[in-house]
Image (spheres, rainbow, N blue to C red):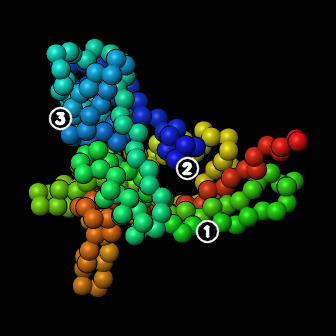
């Protein structure tokens, strides 16, 4: 999944109009305030404002240059796979800087599969997956609606690019069914309310359950 889906997600922000430091783009994707984007020359810019209604972002160059191009590049989301316990351990040791490991996509294990043994049908298996898209949540500063505005919208865009990458890859037949649930404060809950974080950080998540149909790879003629 890391190489065949996440690694092939389109991370380009195509710029249609430049007015000062405000850029009108075709899609905001997972751009959020505070993230770093790059141009074709690897010059870096910090996103200072995002407007989802107008599809605009404001950027501040991190050097003595001005953006005049047509494309900016977002960082490809980080990818983790494993059980909650294993993923949390990897998350904590991956980097001490929260900004260096956000946003990220998590394939939650264990997974289950329906395997087809009939080679003639071309389809190898159906994988029943739980995939979570995650970014930070400023719990002490934001109300619930702030989290929707500042984080969940970008996570929905990220999921959209994830699905597009699947549809463009001939290895996959496609997604036969899916469901999405947003979790403003990503953690476990009980009848008494929020209990604890699943990952040891304040995060917002988009929890997706999907069935991914995978084709047989080409037969090896040895």
Determine the image quadrant of residue 60. top left
Q: Earlier in the sequence, mark 1 or mark 3?
A: 3
The reply to whether residue 153 is visible in this rendering is no
**What residue does disc 2 label?**
1
Give 39 or 14, whichever is nearer the viewer: 39
Number of on-image labels: 3
Q: Earlier in the sequence, mark 2 or mark 1?
A: 2
Residue at 40 percent across and 70 percent down: it is: 85
Give the x, y percent position of residue 25.
33, 28
Q: Earlier in the sequence, mark 2 or mark 3?
A: 2
**What residue does disc 3 label?**
48
- Circle 3 packing at 10 Å, graded few (<14), some (14-19), many (20+), is some
Q: What SS does tag 1 mark? A: strand
Is residue 4 positioned above or below 175 on the image?
A: above
Q: What SS does tag 3 mark? A: strand
Q: What SS does tag 2 mark? A: loop
- In the image, taking residue 48 as reference, residue 210 lies left or right, namely right
- In the image, taking residue 198 as reference, residue 126 lies left or right, namely right
Give 173 or 45, whichever is nearer the viewer: 45
Residue at 88 percent across and 42 percent down: it is: 222
Q: Nearer the viewer, mark 2 or mark 3?
A: 2
Residue at 55 percent across and 50 percent down: it is: 1
Is residue 42 positioned above or below 78 on the image?
A: above
Residue at 52 percent across and 47 percent down: it is: 2
Question: Mark 2 to mark 3: distance in Å?
Answer: 31 Å
Question: Mark 1 to mark 3: distance in Å?
Answer: 42 Å
Give the x, y percent position of residue 40.
37, 19
Residue lying at the far bottom of the rendered structure: 191
Which label was assigned to residue 212? none
Determine the image quadrant of residue 169. top right
**What residue does disc 1 label?**
112
């Amino acid at each position: 999944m890391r190489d065949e889906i996440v690694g092939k997600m389109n991370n380009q922000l195509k710029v249609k109009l430049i007015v000062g430091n405000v850029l009108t783009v075709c899609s905001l994707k997972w751009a959020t305030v505070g993230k770093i984007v790059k141009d074709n020359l690897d010059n870096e810019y910090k996103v200072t404002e995002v407007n989802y209604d107008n599809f605009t972002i404001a950027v501040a160059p991190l050097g003595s240059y001005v953006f005049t191009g047509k494309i900016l590049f977002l960082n490809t989301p980080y990818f983790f796979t494993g059980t909650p316990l294993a993923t949390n351990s990897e998350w904590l040791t991956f980097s001490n800087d929260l900004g260096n490991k956000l946003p990220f996509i998590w394939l939650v294990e264990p997974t289950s599969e329906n395997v087809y043994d009939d080679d003639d049908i071309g389809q190898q298996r159906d994988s029943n997956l739980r995939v979570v898209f995650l970014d930070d949540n400023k719990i002490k500063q934001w109300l619930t609606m702030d989290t929707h505005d500042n984080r969940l919208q970008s996570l929905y865009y990220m999921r959209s690019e994830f699905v597009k990458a699947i549809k463009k890859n001939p290895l996959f037949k496609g997604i036969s069914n899916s469901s999405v649930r947003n979790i403003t404060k990503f953690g476990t809950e009980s009848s008494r309310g929020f209990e604890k974080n699943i990952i040891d950080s304040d995060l917002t998540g988009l929890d997706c359950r999907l069935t991914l149909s995978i084709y047989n790879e080409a037969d090896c003629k040895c």
